[in-house]
Image: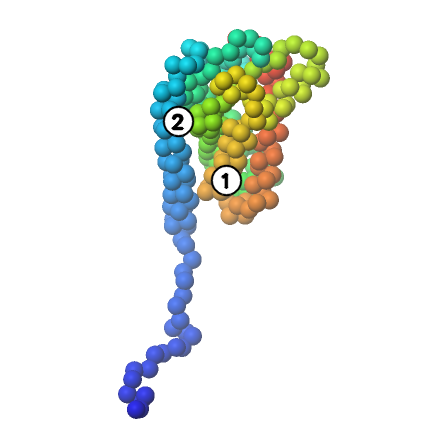
Amino acid sequence: MHTDSFPQLNTSPTESLVIKPMTSLQRISHRFGCAFIILTGSALFHGTAIAQSHASSSSLPDAPQVQIERGLGFFPIVQAPGANDPYAPLSAKQKFRAFARTTFDPSAIVVAALGAGITQPGNSQPQYGEGSVAFGQRVGATAAGYGSATFFIQDLLPTVLHQDPRYFQKGEGNVASRIWYAATRTLVTRQDSGRNNVNASFLGGFAMSVALSNAYYPDRNRNASDAAVRYGEGVAISAVFNVVREFVVKPH
């Protein structure tokens, strides 16, 4: 048999398969698609948890009304009783309401602009560069990070894990003990049953927010090292904010 009768395949390297890189539009669509999938899954979990909470709500005390006050006259804070006061947990619906009222507050835009202004001069994370376009991207990234963090930390995980996202002021004892108490509330929180437990809602929720930020952060900041820095900074800032609330905000 002669093989000359079979068609010959041209294996010239100039005609080999070429994989074209993603365009900017495709990359943006991919990132927002990932974010949409994550948030949709989170919403489904949240809906299931609300149904479960309604089924077991008869065994819990009446939940208090969600009240918002202004820390330092500006930051929205969900009011909570003191650490030693009578306790009643928030319902799943009230946890969502607390998240919505603090996240979609006008002050969030100011906070996002301030955060962008702090990171812009030295081109810190997220490293979008300099100029007005980069500043706008920083504002958007800061707002998205704040919104996702509050959703995971104050609503989704507290509902699923039956934990209370509020800060309960110690309000007594010496200064050192109150500072220690406030700073460690990022690690310890209160279950809906009233007992203390590991603050998995904050620790896990903030980790989820940092992971989600990889969907819209620049490629240069989408790595484990930068993510660890963002996570550590967020935990430290939350601890400092708790200390401020311990000595500035009055319990209700």
Residue at x 52%, y 33% (from the top left corner): 204
Q: Quadrant of residue 119?
A: top right
Furthest-bottom residue in view?
A: 1
Residue type at mark 2: give it: Ala
User: Residue shown at 61%/35% (left/top)?
Assistant: 232
Residue 57 vs 132, above or below: the answer is: above
Q: Which mark is residue 49?
A: 2
The picture places residue 123, in percent across and down from the top left corner, at 58, 40
Question: In the rendering, at what x and y percent does residue 234 appear?
Answer: 58, 31
Residue 51, located in which quarter of the rendered image?
top left
Question: Which of the two labelled residues, at mark 1 and mark 2, occupies the earlier sequence position?
Answer: 2
Q: Secondary structure at mark 1?
A: helix
**Nearer the camera: disc 1 or disc 2:** 2
Question: Which residue bears the numbered disc 1?
Answer: 211
- What's the distance in space between the residues labelled 1 and 2, CA to CA? 22 Å
| Residue 74 picture location, percent across and down | 52, 17
| Location of residue 240 with respect to 22 vertically, above or below | above
Residue drawn at (61%, 15%) of the image: 246
